[in-house]
Amino acid sequence: MLFVEIFRFLLVMAAAVGGLELGHHVAAGGHGPLIGMVLGAAVSYVLGGIVGRLLDRGLQYAVRQLRTMPAGEVFAATIVATSGLLLGVVVGLPFFYLFRSGIELLVTAAFAWVLATLGWRLGAVKGRQVVAAAGLSRLLAPAVEPPPGYALLVDASAVLDRFVLVLGRSGLLPAGVVVPQFVLDQVQTLADAPDPVSSRRARRGLETLEALRGLGVPVHVSTEEVPEVDDPTVKLLTVARRLGLRIGTCSSEVVARAGDWDLPAVDLRRMTAELTPDHPPGERLVLDLVKEGRQPRQAVGYLPDGDMVVVNDASHLVGASDVEVVVLSTRPTNQGLLLFARLVTDTSAPAAERRPGAAQEAVRTT
């Protein structure tokens, strides 16, 4: 209502002045000017309320429409519309000063309004090109950060392991991942370190980020810095709170401290372990033994999902295919699930049917 009442007041004042001038022209003497002023104020008071309410509704509708309009187009349209308004004023003012008439003022206002409307519509359609031609395209650059709450903020431990890549390949990162710049610096430092193991893991982590980009997964690099803090975990938690993102990590310490901060965090290693197929002791598997193990008489093979199987007393079968083993125990590691097994002497079932996934494959074939 404040907008309507102020608009009505301004309209009443303008109509009163207009009625006064009209009264002077119609009847210079007597009560003509006073009657014109009173009639103008009375009519404009009634019309001001109606027009003010209509304008208020129109402005509310315009705001609702602008909510769906990209910010770049709004900015460009505002610039071009303002330029049109100023052009209309500049072109119309000389006529006003030349003729010194209120009618010329109205004509100038109408001309400026037309140019401003044309500028707005032109800016909404071609605004980005117009602003780019003016050298202001940087102001219209899209935000580099994803919408809060959708992407996964990862730390160095998550970058160094394979779990983020697995999620990306599975299409479970639709909004992508966010990597703080200080995390990238930390991984790059490890990649240049003399330790061959850490260096290899760090280089693989950097390759993982490139692989995610190749898969079409958005990889955002956050430039958020926390210069007053040296602890990388506190830095990560601070950035997560600022951006409103869930943390993805392979560090139990980060998960625990995120709980203290009331921040959502996903332990990727634990999640992967829970999703890993369970191989209870006594289960029979069939695999190819490809190399010798670290301990004497051990042989190593791999399951189709990449998990390693260490078979005792099987070094003489290295290079053999379709070797049947029985699981003794399992142990989760950074690289996946590690299985310990021994050879099976009972061959009552064909080896091909005892391979992992053979039963499912037989069902699909049937």
Image (cartoon, grey):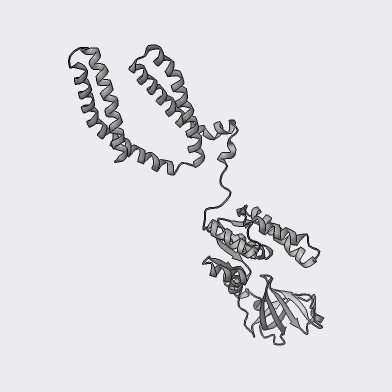
Q: Is residue 70 left or right of 239 when viewed as pictured?
A: left
Picture residue at 78% right of the left edge, 85% below the top: 313
Residue 365 appearing in the image: no
Q: Nearer the viewer, residue 224 or 121?
A: 224
Residue visible at 38% across and 23% down in the picture? 109
Residue 23 relative to residue 86: left or right: left
Percent of width and height locating residue 77? 48, 34
Query: Residue 299 location in percent, x, y?
Result: 78, 79
Q: How many marks?
A: 0
- Residue 158: name its quadrant: bottom right
Query: Which quadrant: the C terminus?
Result: bottom right
Please say if 285 is above or below 125. below
Any part of residue 301 in sight: yes
Q: In the orientation shown, which residue stands out farthest toward the front?
A: 30
Q: Where is residue 170 drawn, in percent x and y?
A: 59, 62
Quadrant for the N terminus in the image: top left
Image position, residue 57 (x, y; %): 32, 39
Whether 319 is drawn above or below 19: the answer is below
Tell me where residue 209 sits by quadrant. bottom right
Q: Is residue 198 above or below residue 176?
A: below
Q: Is residue 348 left or right of residue 147?
A: right
Residue at 43%, 41% in the rendered image: 66
Foreground residue, 286 or 57? 57
Residue at the extreme left: 30
Judge from the rendering whether residue 282 lies leftward or rightward of residue 26; answer left or right.
right
**Against 300, is 22 above or below?**
above
**Residue at (63% x, 69% y) in the render:** 251
Which picture quadrant has residue 350?
bottom right
